[in-house]
Every structure is written in structure tokens, then in C-alpha cells.
Image (tube, rainbow, N blue to C red):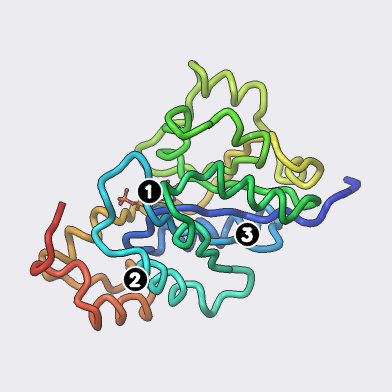
Amino acid sequence: MTTEFFSAPLGVFGGTFDPIHFGHLRTAFEILQTVRLQAVRFVPAGDPPHRDPPQVDAARRLEFVRAAVADQPGFVVDDREIRRAGRSYSVLTLAELRAELPDTPLCLIVGMDAFLGLPTWHRWTELLELAHVVVAPRPGWVAPNSGVLGDLLAARGADAAGTLHNALAGRILIQPVTQLEISSTELRDLLAAGRDPRYLVPDPVRALIRATRSYSVSQPTR
Ligand code: ATP
């Protein structure tokens, strides 16, 4: 039997969410259950580093995220990166959460594509001092077995979710999830082409996209 010293871990799921889709939501839901998280906080980026500016402004992306998670207990929206001035660096968000929740293990949730880019993140070596990392495999992206991330996985990899309950930070768990090959980029392209996003996004998000005419051809595409 495992002795648990801390509160149940909190999932922290950052993203541009431009727009949020079922790939994000199913991944977060399965990790909520399998890792036995107390909750998953969705943290939409205000000004995401390492990419072109989002197509839809932060307030509206936040509205879509709120609509997407509204009926799911354990899913929470955290708008701090939108309220905070400057670039939306995850290390700043995790440092704030660590100060607010000193006894709660934090689990930064990322897809495998994002994990492979981790060494480019601002102050990336501090991330594992603040949180665990839970990695969701994505179609087409392979876990690293060499290089800096391969070494990190060898040193910090966790075999089971329980490991994340017994420390505040510092471990990496690759957690199998149902892999849905949906991306926001493909959704934006589909919407720009006038196609219907039904079954790729929750119905309330689809309704909001329609009502606000977001991602329509009349808007600039990137
Ligand atoms: P874009 O196509 O605009 O880059 P995206 O669909 O990858 O967007 P983001 O908001 O950039 O979505 O991603 C936020 C996080 O969600 C990242 O860690 C990313 O790896 C993860 N993610 C995105 N789509 C999926 C998916 N289909 N399955 C699992 N994880 C996903």
C-alpha cells in the first residue's frame, strides 16, 4: 500500500486552445481519472511563446474553454495567463501555483509534441522543480530515447501514477490515452473552408464559434 503524504495532485493543462477540441478534452479527462488528479486546470495562454499570435483573441478563446468544460466536474478554468501581462510562460504559472498550493503535487500535462519541445521553453530546467510532467502520446510523435530528453526520461521517468502522489514535483509520466488525431490547426483550416466542426469540438463550442463568426474566411488566416 502506498502512503500518501500530500493532497491529490492537480493537473495543469496549458495551451493556446485556438480553439479547444476533443483531443484536449479527452486527454485531460483520461488523465484526470487514471492519474487520480483532484482536478485539471485549463490555463489558456494569453500571449503564447514560440508560435504565431493566436487567430482568435484571448477573451474569446477563454470563453470557448469555459463553455467546453462547464459540465465536467473536476475541470476548472484558470485565466491567470490571460490576466498576466507579458508572455505566457508556464514556469511563471507553475511558480504561482506552487506558492498558492504548497502541499499539492502539480502535474503539467503536455502532448508528446509539446514535450519534445520542452528544452526550448523559458527556464525549462525549473519546470521539474515545480511540477511533475504528464505526457500524452500523440499520433506521429515518438518518445525520445536519447539526447537531453531521453536522459531526463531515464532519470526521472515514473512507472506508475502513484509515484506522482508521493512527491510534489520532479517526475515524468508517459500516460497512454486514447489518441485522437485532432489539432487546432486543422480545425482552423476546416472552419476557414466553411466546413462544420461537429464531433471535433463540444456542441457549446461549435455554437459559440458560429455565433461569433470566429475562424471564418472573412478573418485573416495565418
Ligand atoms: P495547434 O494545432 O494550433 O498547434 P494544438 O491542437 O496542438 O494546436 P494547443 O492548444 O497548442 O493545441 O495544445 C495544448 C496542449 O494540448 C499541448 O500540450 C498539446 O500537445 C496538447 N494537445 C493538442 N492536441 C492534442 C491531441 N489531439 N491529443 C493530445 N494532446 C493534444
Compared with 40, 207 (above or below) is below
Residue toward you, 122 or 186: 122
Percent x, y of residue 69: 50, 72
User: Residue beneath label 2, please?
Assistant: 60
Per the model, the C-alpha gap separating discs 1 and 3 is 24 Å
At x 27%, y 51%, the residue is 53
Residue toward you, 115 or 197: 115
Secondary structure beneath dot 1 equals loop
For the residues bearing labels 2 and 3, Cβ distance under 8 angstroms: no
Q: Is the CB–ligand 1 distance for label 2 below 8 Å?
A: no
Compared with 170, 77 (above or below) is below
For the residues bearing labels 1 and 3, Cβ distance under 8 angstroms: no
Residue toward you, 106 or 154: 106
Is 221 displayed left or right of 187 in the figure? left
Per the model, the C-alpha gap separating discs 2 and 3 is 25 Å
Is 206 displayed left or right of 192 in the figure? right
Q: Is the CB–ligand 1 distance for label 1 below 8 Å?
A: yes
Amino acid found under the numbered disc labelled 2:
Arg
User: Residue beneath label 3, please?
Assistant: 32
